[in-house]
Image (cartoon, rainbow, N blue to C red):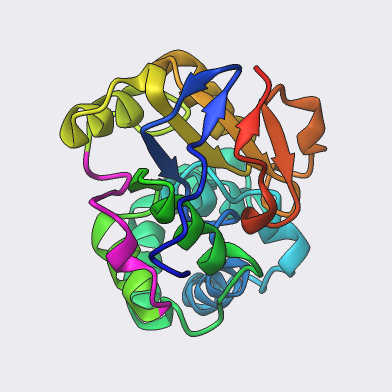
Amino acid sequence: MNAQLQLPGLSVNGRSMRAAIVDLDGTMVDTLGDFHATLNRMLPEFGLPEVSRDQVEVRIGKGSEYLVAQTLRIHVSDAQADELYPRAIDAYQRHYADVNGKHSDVFPGVLEGLQRFTDTGLVLACITNKPTAYARELLRQKGLLDFFRAVNGGDAFARKKPDPMPLVETCRQIGIDPAHTLMVGDSQNDALAAGGAGCAVVLATYGYNHGEPIRATAAAAYFDRLDQLPLQLPA
């Protein structure tokens, strides 16, 4: 973007936004392929069949612990899943370290949308439920890391989204009040976290929302491409 151009600031219902906190999986990067590949490396170690992409997609969004626990339950009883879980999560993390970024792609419009946010003067942070080290590495691989002043994964705080703690603490880190911070996500988890923190929220129509229609979740706006999100939004 030409440095001489001055974009209007981002606002929600007339309230100016000074920062945007952006979710990673399903919002910026399509990581379904990474999760699918990792689980199908893990499951044979326990004598369990592979899973389909559709089975994985509806279980994304609440962190790797939830994903692994619920995937085990596709094939075994709750009691057996609980017994297998400690070894399964260790195996999953081991395989994910090797798979991370190899089967994923940045969604169309994300790079341009982040640049547009930056050109409006917004401070950007990333919050995700995946471990911070994996999040930073994925953002680095995809050429997105330098946009963000802070990157916080599911291991950064005592609680994960949909709890508001990650948003509240990240706002404190970057020095901007939640009332002037926009949450950009793709799921009900993001909306719940934003509501609890006092942030406005906008939601992607293409992400992972546990198989439920995203427009059933209240938001200031919904977007098909991040670079097409209006800069002036209603409440």
Give the x, y percent position of residue 199: 46, 22
What secondary structure prevails in the magenta region?
A: loop
Stretch of the chain drawn in magenta: 142-156
Give the x, y percent position of residue 108: 66, 70
Of residues 39 and 169, which is closer to you in this image? Answer: 169
Q: Quadrant of residue 197?
A: top left
Taking the magenta stretch, the answer to whether it contains residue 152 is: yes
Query: What residue do we see at 41% from left, 61% from top?
Result: 88
Query: What residue do we see at 60% from left, 39% from top?
Result: 231
Of residues 52 and 155, which is closer to you in this image? Answer: 155
> Is residue 75 visible to us here?
no
Of residues 99 and 21, which is closer to you in this image? Answer: 21
Direction front: furthest residue: 4
Is 167 located above or below residue 186 in the figure? above
Query: What residue do we see at 31% from left, 31% from top?
Result: 166
Give the x, y percent position of residue 114: 47, 58
Of residues 69 and 31, which is closer to you in this image? Answer: 31
Give the x, y percent position of residue 210: 70, 42
With 1 as the anchor, is 155 left or right in this view? left
Is 50 located above or below residue 161 in the figure? below
